[in-house]
Amino acid sequence: PNLHPFANLLPFFPGIEQRAGTDTWPNYLDEYVQKSNADLISYDCYVQMNPGQGGWHNYYENLRLYREAALRNGVPFWNTTLSVGHFNYRCPTFNEIRWQFNTTIASGAHGILWFFYYMRQPHSNYRLSPIDEHWNKTETYDSIRRVQKSFNRMYGDLFTHLAATRVTFYPEAFGGGEVWTPNKLVSKLHTGEPKPPLLIGEFSDLQGRPYVMLVNNSMTDNVRVGLTF
């Protein structure tokens, strides 16, 4: 009774509507919440670790679809990100784990799960899970621990009390998202050339106070950015 049950849904990809017996993925998610009375929606998506399978566009499309469904239905959403290489998905590095974590939070998620922690038997071509086939902690374990511990020490549970109000990209949008434009909160982005890829998450708390989260959308390149509020 002290545990919190939930269902982890499939990610959206073209053609899955027929498999799920629905006409559109937004309708499927709405029907799921309404018929199950679920108090959160959760899904997994790994294409960000395999660019040939939709890559960033499908990754961000899912974050957008689940965020919009969460807002429509008044429940939070969680994202299951990749912590173990398998099939054609590469083993995520420290920067790729940090990127998955931060882009998920900036996109409005209230929780993160990792697939997976403990190596399965037989382990096929699953590789470098946080706990390996010898029951030893790997560099993946240390990377996840470092990312989450640093985030929790700096922000605590702040983001679980915020609602996403706008998620935008600069200079190019992914997954059907919006390109950043100036508004009353951020009037200007200061970047060099070429323009770095950025993800900008805007939030509000219960008192209406605004928050901004700026994420470097590159897994490899450092960027320097200024904001004018």
Image (spheres, helix red, strand yellow):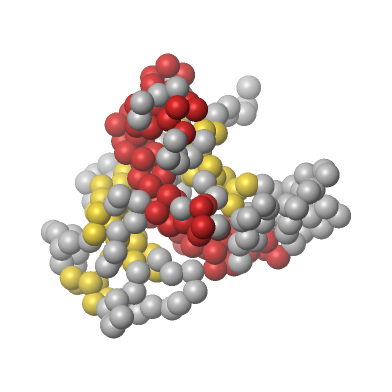
Rendered-image quadrant of the C terminus:
bottom left
**Name of the residue lying farthest toward the top:** 35
Give the x, y percent position of residue 208.
Answer: 22, 46
**What residue lies at 40% left-to-right and 68% top-to-bottom?**
216
In the image, residue 48 above or below residue 192: above
Rendered-image quadrant of the N terminus:
top right
Number of marks in picture = 0
Mark yes or no: residue 153 visible. no
Give the x, y percent position of residue 167.
Answer: 29, 53
Mark yes or no: residue 81 visible. yes
**What residue lies at 53% left-to-right and 42% top-to-bottom?**
44
**Name of the residue lying farthest toward the left:** 184
Along the line of sight, the residue nearer the viewer: 185 or 2: 185
Give the x, y percent position of residue 174.
Answer: 34, 56
Give the x, y percent position of residue 25.
Answer: 38, 32
In the image, residue 16 above or below residue 195: above
In the image, residue 80 above or below residue 7: below
Report which quarter residue 72 is drawn in: top left
**What residue lies at 70% left-to-right and 49% top-to-bottom?**
117
Q: Is residue 181 left or right of residue 219?
A: left
**Name of the residue lying farthest toward the bottom:** 193
**What residue lies at 55% left-to-right and 58% top-to-bottom?**
49
